Amino acid sequence: MNAVKINVLAAAVMAAGILNSPAQTNVVTVTNFVTVVITNVVTVTNIISATPAAQTNGFAFVAAKLPMIMPAPPKYPWKNSVSAGLSLARGNKNTTMFNADFQTDKKTPFDEYHFGLGMAYGEQNAVETVNNYKEFGQWNHLFTSRFFGYLRTEGLHDSIASLDYRLTLGPGVGYYLIKGTNTTLAVETGGAYEFQRLGGEDQSFVTARLAERFEHKINGRARLWQSVEIQPQVDIMENYVINFEIGAEAAITKSFSLKTYFDDTYANRPAADHLKNDAKLVAGVSYKF
């Protein structure tokens, strides 16, 4: 009986030693009494990546490292809009008035881009009363959140004013007096070189430029805007042009809106036998995409 106790005790001691040995299958045989099979193997699967395993009493603990998700870079898309309006009158006077314009804008933390095309055509009793085409483009580079430099170009053709073309191109600087989420107010000053054919006469000269732009958004569904600029010829200050615009836009749906604005151009030295002032009130539907 004492021999049996000694053998059982010996088997227990051997089994404890096996548990503290490296992971493998061990067979311990105690003659004439019992056979003990001990397996201390731990299998871990589906590990993406792991740090070196820490050994504790023969068991391997593996820490999985989760993949890092990088945020998507910010996007600064172009915002485009097309507007068109048509007015017809038939009776004692047959009047037709059509206008259309396209605008696109893009803003990034350091640059702003504004481009636009527009046209208007009207006639009364088969006689032209409006016939003009215009374009503008401006690139602003922000040196601070409010102070920027710009490069601007403008073009205009107006048959009724005997203006075959007027092209200006020049640099300048500007500053946002107000720059909020819903309201902006900026002032600009600079110079430009101007080419024009007015009344059949070709002219070119240097102009200065003073301008102001304002915009206010109401509840995300409507906006008001206003702009004015004056461009005098630097060596003949009496020869100047003033452009003024004020308007309002109200959303009908996410993409469509109603747009109305008043546009006025005042040329202090117009072509011979022409008025100094050309003004028009425009109403139409705008589509944004």
Image (cartoon, grey):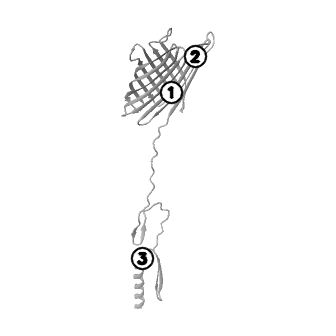
Badge nearest the viewer, 2 or 3: 2
Q: What residue is disc 1 on?
A: 116
Whether residue 289 is situated above or below residue 213 in the rendered picture = below
Whether the residues at callouts 3 and 1 have beta carbons within 8 Å, the answer is no
In percent of width and height, residue 24 lies at: 46, 75
Please name the amino acid that badge 1 sits on. Gly
Please name the amino acid that badge 2 sits on. Gly
Q: In terms of depth relative to the viewer, which is nearer, 178 or 133?
A: 133
Gap in Å between the C-alphas at discs 1 and 2? 21 Å
Point out which mark residue 227 bears.
Answer: none
Whether the residues at callouts 2 and 3 have beta carbons within 8 Å, the answer is no
| Quadrant containing the N terminus in the rendered view | bottom left
Disc 2 residue crowd, few under 14, some 14–19, many 20+, Cα 10 Å: some
- Secondary structure at numbered mark 1: strand
The answer to whether residue 14 is visible is yes
Q: Earlier in the sequence, mark 1 or mark 2?
A: 1
Badge nearest the viewer, 3 or 1: 1
Point out which mark residue 19 bears.
Answer: 3
Disc 1 residue crowd, few under 14, some 14–19, many 20+, Cα 10 Å: some
Whether the residues at callouts 1 and 2 have beta carbons within 8 Å, the answer is no
The answer to whether residue 39 is visible is no
| Quadrant containing the C terminus in the rendered view | top right
- Secondary structure at numbered mark 3: helix
Q: What residue is disc 2 on?
A: 122
In percent of width and height, residue 265 lies at: 47, 17
- Secondary structure at numbered mark 2: strand
In percent of width and height, residue 120 lies at: 55, 20
Disc 3 residue crowd, few under 14, some 14–19, many 20+, Cα 10 Å: some
Residue at image coords 43%, 28%: 151
Gap in Å between the C-alphas at discs 3 and 1? 81 Å
